[in-house]
Image: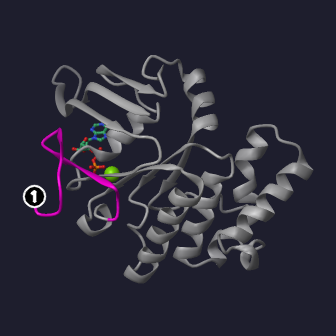
Amino acid sequence: MISVKELSHSFKIGKKGKEKRIPVLKGLTFEVADGEIVSIVGRSGSGKSTLLHIMAGFLTPDSGEIHVNGVETSSFTEVESAKFRLDNYGFVFQNFQLMPGLNAFENVELPLKLKGIDKSERRKKVRDLMKSVGLAEVQDHYPNELSGGQQQRVSIARALITDPPIIFADEPTGSLDSETEQDVLLLIQSLNKTRGITFVIITHDDEVAQTADRVYRMRDGELSEGGMHDAI
Ligand SMILES: Nc1ncnc2c1ncn2[C@@H]1O[C@H](COP(=O)(O)OP(=O)(O)O)[C@@H](O)[C@H]1O
Ligand SMILES: [Mg+2]
């Protein structure tokens, strides 16, 4: 469902007149199938977040193409990208990125407000989802009144609330202790099974990567399909 072809990107660094281009992604070609959990693992600085930003349309690549269900997303305008994201993608980040001034319920409700869904439908959807991911008890809590694991559950619920076919997760367990990490990984697996959501999980952690159906390894700006025993 996601097809990436010959994707390259570099960043310009240095002072004016002395700029250098640092290549970060060097001609990546890979696919993510419908209903799969795919992980992309690699060292810090290897270009994983850059790849995710490009796949999600936050950043335009130097060259290459991305197709999502047959639609070429890499040539979208900013407005087209934003609309496509709202309809197709959910996002989960390492640092949760919840709105501190909104409680858990309101954080999960926000994407539905952005989509213009009316209040009674919104409230019912949010209530049902929060119950199903074990957040009913804490829906009135503000982010600073929740544990890290609970905050990540809220951010996963927020990613799910619009029923996106694809969720991108950038180091989703990077701020969690190992027990909570397991909870979050199990939640991802169960959402994949019960709702058929495709997950692209980015991580520097081999153990997290190995919970996916398929693992891609990022190294020196290139991607290879590989397992745990490949040296990084
Ligand atoms: N906006 C930017 N400008 C210049 N260099 C950047 C920018 N964003 C990322 N980089 C560089 O690109 C490389 C890859 O970064 P990133 O994709 O964040 O890696 P990862 O997520 O694997 O840790 C790093 O060397 C980083 O310093
Ligand atoms: Mg990163």
Q: Which residues are magenta?
A: 211-232
Q: Position of residue 211 (x, y in %)?
A: 34, 65
SS for dot 1:
loop
Q: Is residue 103 visible?
A: no
Amino acid at dot 1: Asp
Q: Position of residue 6 (x, y in %)?
A: 24, 24
Q: Is residue 74 magenta?
A: no
> Is 132 positioned to the left or the right of 147 in the image?
right
Using the image as rendered, state which of residue 146 and residue 118 is in the foreground.
Answer: 118
Total marks placed: 1
Specify the quadrant that holds the N terminus.
top left
Q: Which residue is mark 1?
A: 230
Q: Is residue 138 visible?
A: yes
> Is 63 positioned to the left or the right of 23 in the image?
right
Asked whether mark 1 lies closer than 8 Å to ligand 1, one says: no
76 over 196 or under it: above or below: above
Quarter where residue 80 is shown: top right
222 over 64 or under it: above or below: below
Q: Is residue 222 magenta?
A: yes
> Is 157 positioned to the left or the right of 15 in the image?
right
Q: Position of residue 55 (x, y in %)?
A: 41, 34
Using the image as rendered, state which of residue 129 and residue 190 is in the foreground.
Answer: 190
Q: Position of residue 62 (x, y in %)?
A: 29, 21
Specify the farthest residue to the right: 120
The scheme the figure's colours follow is one colour
Q: What is the crowding at mark 1: few (fewer than 14 residues within 10 Å), some, or many (at least 20)? A: few
Identify the residue shown where x is 18% and y is 27%: 21
Identify the residue shown where x is 54% and y is 23%: 78
Identify the residue shown where x is 50% and y is 18%: 76
Specify the farthest residue to the left: 231
46 over 181 or under it: above or below: above
